[in-house]
Image (cartoon, grey):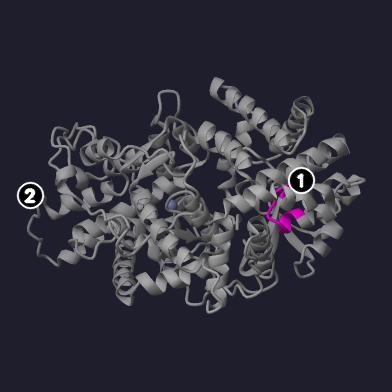
Amino acid sequence: MHRWPAVAIALVMGASTLVVAQSTPSGSIATVRFNPDLLDKSIDPCTDFYAYACSKWQAQNPIPSDRPSWGRFNELQDRGEVLVRGILEKYSKDDPKRSAIEQKIGDYYYSCMDESAIEKAGTKPLQPTLERIATLRSKDEFAKEAITLHRDGIRAFFDFGSQPDFKDAQQVISAAEQGGLGLPDRDYYFKDDEKSVEIRKQYLAHVQKMFELLGDPAEKAAAEAKAVMEIETALAKGSLDRTAQREPEKIYHKMSTKELGELNPSFGWTPYLEGIGAPPLQSLNVAEPEFFKQFDATLKSTSLADWKNYLRWHAVHGNAAMLPSAFVSENFEFFGKTLQGTKELAPRWKRCVRAATGDLGEAIGQIYVAETFGPEGKERTQKMVDEIEKALGHDIETLPWMGDDTKKQALEKLKAITNRIGYPDKWKDYSTLKIVRGDALGNSLRSNTFAFQRDLNKVGRPVDKGDWPYPPMTVNASYNPLLNNITFPAGILQPPFFDNQADDALNYGAIGAAIGHELTHGFDDEGAKFDPVGNLKNWWTAKDKEEFEQRTSCVKDQYAGYSPLPDVKLNGKLTLGENTADNGGLRIAYLALLDSFAGKEPAPIDGLAAQQRFFLGFANVWCQNRTDQITRYLANIDPHSPGKFRVNGTVSNMPEFGAAFHCKADAPMVRENACRVW
Ligand SMILES: [Zn+2]
């Protein structure tokens, strides 16, 4: 499932394929706890706290060849992938005694792992799609074709799905959004620095090679790739950039279906909306009207033959993972190696574990949770959430810059936040999804159709707050301003984020700061625009709003000054929400820790005071190594700052950090003009 509620905010990027183990059964990788021996005593924590906390870990943990980066999150993912592999292998034998769920996950994995059958089938499973595209007689047939492609999970033309109505967040409406690109972001089509020009050149070569793998002669394939690039560039031109997409007003344009037809008359919206499988609708959110205008112009100006090549490209691109190895390798060469700097393709079993998790996440999750996650994990986390919410409440009450009226509203919003911890109360019902042993590509297509239909079935109904955006194995967490809730799946509730054997100080610095981070998202530059029930509605007085913007502007400028590579700067506005959440989250977790002392400070452990252990617990989870390629890639698209700046940027805004490590007033980790929003 590729669509999230438009504005859900995660702790790190890319939640959907991240899986993890709660326990450490034999054969899996050992739990990694905080280790004071990994502190680099040759570095002054007041000069570079990240290097003090992480440089030894970085030296001992090079990036594995099948990854573009390696950090503490990935250690958890790896352990989880081993556990999920065990579950999938157990049920992959053709045993009539398997339950319906066990049959689905087992046969999905078996089919994905059966490389010889996939090689033998060649492109045959994709032929019906390719033939359908080849026989399109006019652009009038695009609406019908778009329905089939979208239901198959092929993201051609634009994206379509459901979302809560920004102005009436209890109700689900449908939404048409910009999409249809092969590169990760619209800016990739226009940036004119040397690296970006080179990436476009290689992308063009990649599209050509995929056409060649479908059997086209090189020259023809080159012309087809050029046509694809022209269409995608035209669509990109009408697309909003990432930073603008963080502004809810810019992605909310509710209009009648008639108005959409007038905006984009060259596409058959009436047949599309009638055939897509959503309840009949009067209106929908056309997230980016400019995109659909541009889509219309491109439909008119581009030949049917070129559009057919565009559709063929997306059909093969979207299904590359379940096609023969030549397609898989070529896809990896560009998207893994060139874009992210990954050296080697991950082993087949890992790719199949990730595919199964993506398509059948809660089916696997039910078994995963039963085997690994006990009620005590839920209880301790709930308690910590309560304490950190209390700290945020106290923080709001005592904010020097906010007036009483706005404070009252903010406290009301805080009180209304609901928590989802561990796993959903009700599992997704997969009974209508058919998984066929030996049909890897078909299973993937049917899973996409299932997810697409399930999403559209929500339209016209009240929001289902029990529906989770990702499976419980996920090593991530999120806040959704439209639901005003936070989600902490079982996958993240383990060391080094949450360690049952560790002291409170370490846990407050790690999972506590993560909880504080998600809560603060309700009050960052984006979240603060939504009210307690999730409606896009101003609850600020004009003066307080001005004060707020002045403070977020300080954070924006601070992070815009950071350079992860000599020629790459962070985008202060794109990362503003996450940086605000990091700063607020760490502060309220710290306040909650002080509260937990109840006047009696715990004795130092390993020579480290509780306050020092708190900041080390925080830094520890962000230790990471990255290829230059992925650093560049993420600077373009990731609203999160790299680990180094998440740590140093945040602690240097807290005088409490300087006090804990006895820093001099002019030390680099003590910012003269410290930023503080919350
Ligand atoms: Zn976040």
Residue 222's place in the image compared with 581, above or below, is above
> Residue at 78% across / 42% down in the picture?
295
The Cα atoms of the two marked residues, 2 and 1, are separated by: 61 Å
Q: Which residue is mark 2?
A: 607
Q: Position of residue 631 (x, y in %)?
A: 44, 34
- The amino acid beneath tag 1 is Phe
Other residues around mark 1 within 10 Å, as few (<14) / some (14–19) / many (≥20): many
Query: Which secondary structure class fits the magenta region best?
Result: loop
Q: Are marks 2 and 1 in contact (CB under 8 Å)?
A: no
Residue 280: say if magenta.
Answer: no
> Residue at 86% across / 59% down in the picture?
270
Pointer 2 residue Cβ closer than 8 Å to ligand 1: no
Q: Position of residue 151 (x, y in %)?
A: 72, 59
- Pick the front one: 600 or 151: 151
Query: Which of the two marks, 2 or 1, is nearer to us in this view?
Result: 2
Count of marks placed on residues: 2
Image quadrant holding the N terminus, namely: bottom right
**Residue 588 appears in the rendering:** no
Q: Position of residue 490 (x, y in %)?
A: 39, 66
| Occupied quadrant, residue 160 | bottom right
**Residue 436 appears in the rendering:** yes
Pointer 1 residue Cβ closer than 8 Å to ligand 1: no
Return the mark for residue 572.
Answer: none
Q: Which residue is mark 1?
A: 292
Residue 157: say if magenta.
Answer: yes
Residue range corresponding to the magenta coloring: 149-158
Earlier along the polypeptide chain: callout 2 or callout 1? 1
Residue extending farthest to the top is 194
- Pick the front one: 550 or 333: 333
